[in-house]
Amino acid sequence: MIDHDEEVPVPPRPHHPPLTDRRTFLRFTAGAAAVLPLTALAGCSGSSRDPNSIRIAFQQFGSGTIKQEWITTAAQEFSAENPELTVELVPIVASENDYFTKNELLMSSPRTSPDLVYEDSFILLSDVGADYLQPITDLVEGFEHWDDIAEASKKAVTSEDGEAYGVPITTDTRAIWFHRDVFEQAGLPPDWQPGSWEDILEAARAIRDSDSEAIPFFLFAGTPQGEKASMQGFEMLLYGTGDGSGLYDAETKKWILGSPGFVDSLTFLKTLFDEELTATLGQHLDPNISETIYSSLLPDGKLGMLVDGSWISQNWTETAARPWPEWPDVVGLADMPTQDGGGTGTITLAGGWGLSIPEYVTDRDVAYRFLEKLVSTQTLVQYAIADNHITVRADVADKEEYLSYSPAVEYFTDLLETAYYRPALPAYPEVSSAIQEAMEAVMTGTSPDAAAAAYDATVTDIVGPENVQEASA
């Protein structure tokens, strides 16, 4: 699994698909698509689509084949049950940013559009706003496992008009990963659980002042980190600052400005830099810092604490680039506390991916039938284990096979119960970018108040003055 989340602009949907659509589509998929039964995708990419063929587009990370194996297994079963139908796999080998853009280009034309797409909840409602996806409320109302899906995950694929635009499959939650050896050197307990932001800062100070050479604390921040900075970083602070201090008011349907919690979150970030409790500015602005963290800093005891997602232990499996079989004994997990321990006491943000049906689907009912095959209970159990992700489904989470696949899976699955999702509305990618800019401004010397004021002005420009409101007292 990802890193899941990076900001990307959403291109407008063309009324008349440009002549380059077909060539772009062939460039993405020709020679790379696995087809069941085996055919050549290039051979069916003309102006007319084969009504007996279901095309599914999904992101592939380099040479990784986890998603392809999941889809292939379901496709084999589906093709055996429906011999008149074929399933075309369209792996898009791309980063998060590029995947979103390429997927949207495919969906923009009836000639190139998939029949099913793997969508990040971060971008889904932006794609809805661009008319790339169609509502499937009437279909999911009859889905036997709809009630097994976590409410927060269902809300993430539901537009403000109440229509569902996807079936959630995976999710992720976030917490503080800490290195017990670094903690021991600093005189901190191996079962540490902070009750407030101040507890985190005190632990970071203890590490800084110890004989350890480890970076005390790392929080993703700044524009090079993209959505990781917004979600794994800033929003893990902001959503713990009290009621009315989020980004968006769902009741009034307005974006929140002038939030004291926003300033407090930036002030926490400023404290990390002022007191040398985090990595250098250069490290924070390195777009590849996460790879360094997972491959060396954390395994080598050069980092004390990291706010990050449920999936990162996949970097340490025996088949990973940096196997670290000792990590369950060396790494501790702590819930992220709210600012002062108030409210629910702890906070986590959740994201995730699901399947959606594009506007230009060839046969909506057939596509949905294959979607149901992809999300059967046992299929999703095996996919979660292979992909090292958290399920959104109670029926999957009840399986012992799922609960035992990782030392951390039960912990992160339980966090979903009180998770917040981002307001993944069409404007969110731009709002997220404004958050990253505010963080980076503070990191480079701007005061939290000034950075927050600049954020407020930017968001007002993005959504319009009629769609913002001042934070409640």
Image (cartoon, rainbow, N blue to C red):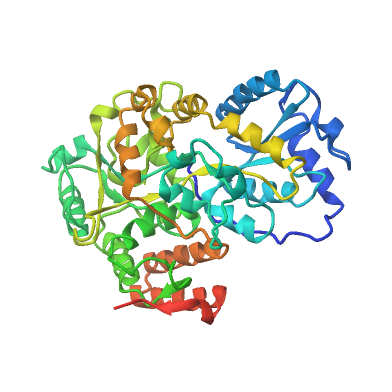
Q: Quadrant of the C terminus?
A: bottom left
Residue farthest along the left direction in this orientation: 187
Residue drawn at 43 percent across, 46 percent down: 289
Number of numbered discs overlaid on the protein picture: 0
Residue farthest along the bottom direction in this orientation: 465
Please tell me whether residue 55 is drawn above or below residue 286 in the rendered image. above
* Image quadrant assignment for residue 435: bottom left
Asked if one can make out residue 195 in the rendered structure from this viewpoint, the answer is yes
Residue drawn at 40 percent across, 64 percent down: 439
* Image quadrant assignment for residue 454: bottom left
Please tell me whether residue 185 is drawn above or below residue 15 in the rendered image. above
Closer to the camera, 405 or 229? 405
Please tell me whether residue 383 is drawn above or below residue 244 in the rendered image. above
Residue farthest along the front direction in this orientation: 142
The x, y position of residue 263, in whole percent, is 32, 71
Closer to the camera, 127 or 82? 82
Image position of 322 (left or right of 410): right
Residue farthest along the top direction in this orientation: 80
